[in-house]
Image: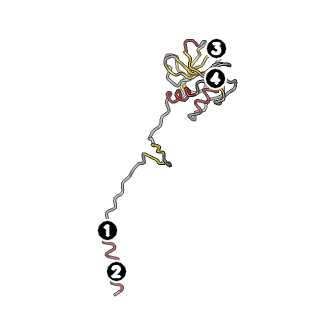
């Protein structure tokens, strides 16, 4: 009799289990929660020249410092190196060596975020911000600021990093 009850119970359990519908659905997370904040995951995050310039503008007013590469003070190439490193892009230390990166761009085809170089022998660099202007760390006694390209002597070349 015990065997019959066990078999019957088992059979009823199988019938009951078979009557429950289980449905699987594939889902993709669009939000990841961390504590009280929400970060939305994007399928593709693409860095733009506008991102570069927006960060560079936040550094306006930081004083020129010979050999400087930090927010305590920048020289021209230390400034561009710092800005791009904020986006995990490595540039060489000097203005002249930074011309080895990216692709050559004519002055007529400058885009926001392009590096612009000056001097018959490259001696200065800045970042094009649009409308004929660029941002740079110009010289001792000055600070990071936006200037017009047309007033900067000895424009030499430009490079597009992005």
Asked if the residue under mark 2 is in contact with the one under mark 3, i.e. CB atoms within 8 Å, the reply is no
Q: Is residue 123 visible?
A: no
Which quadrant: the N terminus?
bottom left
75 left or right, relative to 147:
right
Q: Is label 2 or label 4 in front?
A: 4
Q: Nearer the viewer, mark 1 or mark 3?
A: 1
Find out whether the residues at labels 2 and 4 contact each other: C-beta distance under 8 Å.
Answer: no
Q: Which residue is mark 2?
A: 7
Q: Is disc 3 placed on a helix, strand or loop?
A: loop
- Under circle 1, the secondary element is helix
- The residue at the far front in this view is 36
Q: Residue at x 35, y 84 (%)?
A: 3
Q: Residues within 10 Å of mark 3 (few under 14, many from 20)?
A: few
**4 or 3: tag closer to the N-terminus:** 4
Query: Residue 47: image x %, image y %?
Result: 50, 33
Residue 76 is labelled as 4
In the rendering, at what x and y percent does residue 36 appear?
48, 47
* Mark 3 to mark 2 CA distance (whole Å): 95 Å
Q: Residue at x 66, y 27 (%)?
A: 73
Of 147 and 77, which appears nearest the observer?
147
Badge 4 crowding class, 10 Å Cα cut-off, few under 14, some 14 to 19, many 20 or more, is many
Which residue matches tag 3? 120
Question: Reading the chain from its start, which is encountered first: label 1 or label 3?
Answer: 1
The kind of secondary structure element at disc 2 is helix
Do callouts 4 and 3 mark residues in contact (Cβ within 8 Å)? no
């Amino acid at each position: 009799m015990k065997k019959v009850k066990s078999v019957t119970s088992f059979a009823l359990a199988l019938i009951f289990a078979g009557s429950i519908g289980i449905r699987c659905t594939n889902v993709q997370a669009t939000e990841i929660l961390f504590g009280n904040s929400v970060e939305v995951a994007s399928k593709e995050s693409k860095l733009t020249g506008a991102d570069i310039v927006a960060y560079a503008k936040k550094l306006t007013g930081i004083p020129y410092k010979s050999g400087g590469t930090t927010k305590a003070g920048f020289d021209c190439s230390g400034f561009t190196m710092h800005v791009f490193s904020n986006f995990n892009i490595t540039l060489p230390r000097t203005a002249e060596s930074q011309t080895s990166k990216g692709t050559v761009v004519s002055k007529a085809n400058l885009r926001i975020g392009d590096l612009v170089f000056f001097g018959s022998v490259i001696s200065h660099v800045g970042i094009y911000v649009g409308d004929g202007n660029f941002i740079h760390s110009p010289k001792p006694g000055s600070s990071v600021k936006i200037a017009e390209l047309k007033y900067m002597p000895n424009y030499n070349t430009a490079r597009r990093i992005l």
